[in-house]
Amino acid sequence: MGGGAEKFLSLAQLSEEGGKDSVGWFEKGAAALKARIQALESAKEKGKSGDEQTMLLEELRKKLAMTLCSVAEVYMTDLSWEEDAEQRCESLTTEATMVAPDFAETWQTLANVRISQSRFDDAKAALNRSLELWKDLPPEDPSVPDFPSRVGLSRLLMEVELEQDAIEVLERLVAEDDQSVEVWYLGGWSLYVMGEKQKESKAEEDWKASWISSRVWLNQCLHLYKLQEYEDERLGEHANELLAAIGKELGEAVAGEDDDEQDWEDEESDEEMQE
């Protein structure tokens, strides 16, 4: 009794069984949210709601959309073997985008579904819609997705070969937090892929510049990887493989190429000494 939708959403996330058990709790949470939304919409239609209720209604719609997306993600992972998994993902993401069309994460989840369906043009359209909702906003704006969500977004952008957009997202993430191993890795990988494409198109100076930048990102990734004793061995191995491929083509880094990286290392060393 009591606690509203939040208790169900918490139980869904804490469920040790996962799968259908999580979905069951998410659905109870969604039902509770829909009831609150309906009550507020009814009051609004009767002219009995003010600005505070309007803001609450918007927040509840976003929470409902996020809940629907969470269920879709369960069906894309733990319950992907279910016969109706694709159909459920389709209906859930469609409902989420209708409930909160200005919520960037709903379009990101829809893009993930489209990628799983190999509908890459539709995935690109959904990702562009997601980006348009926040890319020109300041970091503190509540419409900007949280850090982990944007890391996931950069991976999706790479999957549909929108490397330039991925790099722009990652550059913004680095500006907010320059200690994320994964962000530096994804930036280096994106620049490497861009360089490969430029190399195929015979744009020599462009691909060299991309790979030089890639090397800076990857070196910083591995520096933080070692410093933080990062546990993802596959990430570290892939970063080293990319660096080896770059070194084979460009030779060793020339003096001054990694000045920015050295500055980051010097700053961190100064901080450690102060501590």
Image (spheres, grey):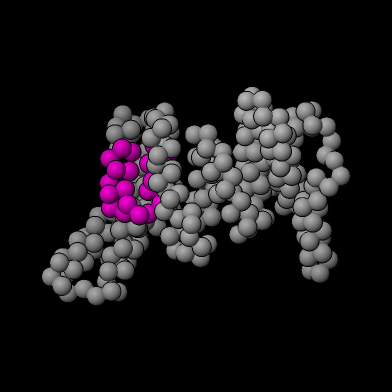
The residue that appears at 49% across and 34% down in the rendered structure is: 160
Looking at the rendering, the stretch of residues picked out in magenta corresponds to 89-114
Question: Is residue 8 in sight in this rendering?
Answer: no
Tell me residue 17's x, y (percent): 41, 44
In this image, 107 relative to 210: left or right?
left
The quadrant where residue 198 appears? top right
The quadrant where residue 188 appears? top right
Asked whether 76 or 183 is in front, the reply is 183
Question: How many numbered discs?
Answer: 0
Tell me residue 181's x, y (percent): 66, 48
- Residue 14 sits inside the magenta stretch: no
Quarter of the image with the C terminus is bottom right
The residue that appears at 15% across and 67% down in the rendered structure is: 45
Given the current orientation, which residue lies at the most extreme left position?
46
The residue that appears at 40% across and 57% down in the rendered structure is: 10
Please name the predominant secondary structure of the magenta segment in the image: helix
Given the current orientation, which residue lies at the most extreme right position?
255
Tell me residue 53's x, y (percent): 27, 71
In this image, 184 relative to 134: left or right?
right
Q: Is residue 258 above or below residue 179?
A: above
Tell me residue 54's x, y (percent): 27, 69
In this image, 42 relative to 133: left or right?
left
- Residue 91 sits inside the magenta stretch: yes
Quarter of the image with the N terminus is bottom left
Asked whether 192 or 42 is in front, the reply is 192
Asked whether 146 or 232 is in front, the reply is 146
In this image, 172 relative to 105: left or right?
right
The quadrant where residue 219 appears? top right
Question: Is residue 102 in sight in this rendering?
Answer: yes
The residue that appears at 31% across and 69% down in the rendered structure is: 55
